[in-house]
Amino acid sequence: MPLATEGLPSTASFDNVHLVLQSAENRAQVIKDTAAIATFVITNKDKSITASYTVDFKNEGTVKLGEYEGKEEDVDITLYLSDESFNDLATDKTSAKWLIFTGKLKTKGSILKGRTVEAALKWARGKHEELIKNGGGVDAGAAATAVPATV
């Protein structure tokens, strides 16, 4: 089931991260390097569509559509941003630091954990590009239907 939300094209990036995390080795790596749970709240330009995504890079190495299902205090950082800003972040066109500086990203929680989540997204993007280039790696069928690395 695709994670992308209609009307929020940038959210296709979560499908790419999900695909990368199908590998036990990749899951273990992101948990070891990141150790954070983050919620992304993404809205379209006119704020008529909003979607939340939870990335658990602390316990499970998963990406899910929706708010975190555990205790709220377990979420290390919540990031609030537009679809356009998330696209720029996910495709490495800008940094979270710049988005915060320009007022395009609001956060709640640990900024330090936010930096590790940003690094994990960048790492996953590179791994996804490798999967596509190599014809799949984890699951050739899934890679063939994967969303392009840039949205």
Image (cartoon, rainbow, N blue to C red):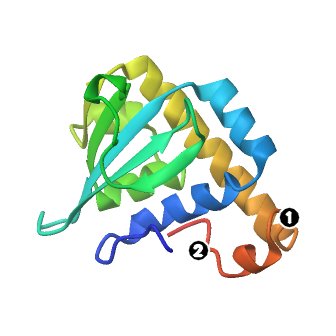
State the SS at label 1: loop
Query: Which x, y percent locates residue 130?
Result: 80, 59
Q: Which residue is at 50% across, 59% downward?
A: 14
Q: Which residue is at 38% across, 25% downward?
A: 76
* Distance from the alpha carbon under mark 1 to that under mark 2: 15 Å
Quick one: 122 or 53, which is closer to the camera?
53
Q: Amino acid at mark 2?
A: Val
Q: What numbered label is drawn on residue 137?
A: 1
Q: Which residue is at 75% across, 44% downward?
A: 26
Report whether 15 appears left or right of 103: right
Q: Amino acid at mark 1?
A: Gly
State the SS at label 2: loop
Report whether 12 appears left or right of 134: left
Q: Does residue 75 appear in the picture of this structure?
A: yes
Q: Residues within 10 Å of mark 1 (few under 14, many from 20)?
A: some
Earlier in the chain: of badge 1 and badge 2, it is 1
Report whether 67 appears left or right of 117: left
Quick one: 84 or 141, which is closer to the camera?
141
| Mark 1 or 2, closer to the camera | 1
Q: How many marks?
A: 2
Query: Which x, y percent locates residue 25?
Result: 80, 42
Q: What numbered label is drawn on residue 147?
A: 2
Q: Which residue is at 34% across, 46% downward?
A: 40
Residue 46 location, quadrant: bottom left
Query: Which x, y percent locates residue 98?
Result: 37, 35
Q: What numbered label is drawn on residue 31?
A: none
Query: Which x, y percent locates residue 42?
Result: 28, 55
